[in-house]
Amino acid sequence: MATTTVVHLLRHGEVHNPSGVLYGRLPDFHLSELGRTMAQRAAQALADRDVAIVTASPLERAQETAGPIAEAHGLSIGTDADLIEAENIFEGRKVSLKGLLTSPGIWPSLRNPFTPSWGEPYVQLAGRMRSAVARARDEARGREAVLVSHQLPIWVARLDVEGRRFAHDPRKRQCSLASLTSLHYEDDGLVAVVYTEPSADLLPRASKATGA
């Protein structure tokens, strides 16, 4: 009989980012008050699940989002560097389409949206997320795991498991703040991907400068 395991990929909640920069892997970017509420919503959504492990990206916003879930299940928070945000050369800057188009010096970095040329290659990102998911699935075998990461890593992981091309329009990612992308396995075979938004009603209040 097949063993059912679920790996939930949870995007962190809203971040306090008054300067509106692309914060990427920069330190000291923490959840906002709204973001903490989103983390609690995620914990409530997972309260009745058989969660065996909670693991997060090393960045503060992911660790803070993981906190209420780990507490609710009496678990400690694990850290996996493979869940970290993607590298991006625009980290620490305010990024807008107008700004990109009026800054010829950075145009060479925009030459290839398929790799992409401005950041960590999608293939590399997919590979490390695949490894993180496999480790969590093995550790939580027969139960459920929660992995707290960031928008682009989670979205690329989903594209990967669904066999879709990595190049995409960032505006069309289905991965809102504090959303759950749940991977359902029978033994090691993926049988379903289920997407839910525990904080859907809070999203209109969220800052647009979320940085992922």
Image: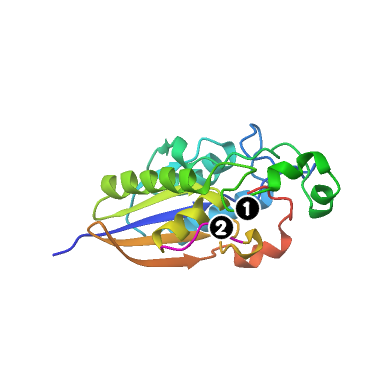
* x 59%, y 55%: residue: 38
Residue type, mark 2 in image: Ala
Depicted 1 relative to depicted 85: above or below: below
Residue type, mark 1 in image: Pro
Q: CA distance from mark 2 to mark 1?
A: 7 Å
- Give the mark, 2 or 1, whose residue is nearer the N terminus: 1
Q: Position of residue 54 (x, y in %)?
A: 40, 45
Q: Residues within 10 Å of mark 2 (few under 14, many from 20)?
A: some
Q: How is the image coloured?
A: rainbow
- Residue 167's label in the rendered image is 2
Q: Residues within 10 Å of mark 1 (few under 14, many from 20)?
A: some
- Residue 113's label in the rendered image is 1
Which span is picked out in magenta?
Answer: 163-168
- For the stretch drawn in magenta, what is the main secondary structure? loop
Give the SS element for disc 2.
loop
How many discs appear? Answer: 2
Asked if residue 130 is among those painted magenta in the image, a careful observer would answer: no
* x 72%, y 42%: residue: 108
Asked if residue 165 is among those painted magenta in the image, a careful observer would answer: yes
Depicted 3 relative to depicted 58: above or below: below
Q: Are marks 2 and 1 in contact (CB under 8 Å)?
A: yes
Give the SS element for disc 1.
loop
The quarter of the picture where residue 9 lies is bottom left
- 210 vs 51, nearest the viewer: 210
* x 47%, y 60%: residue: 159
Pick out the residue farthest to the top: 27
Depicted 207 relative to depicted 105: above or below: below
Q: Quadrant of the N terminus?
A: bottom left
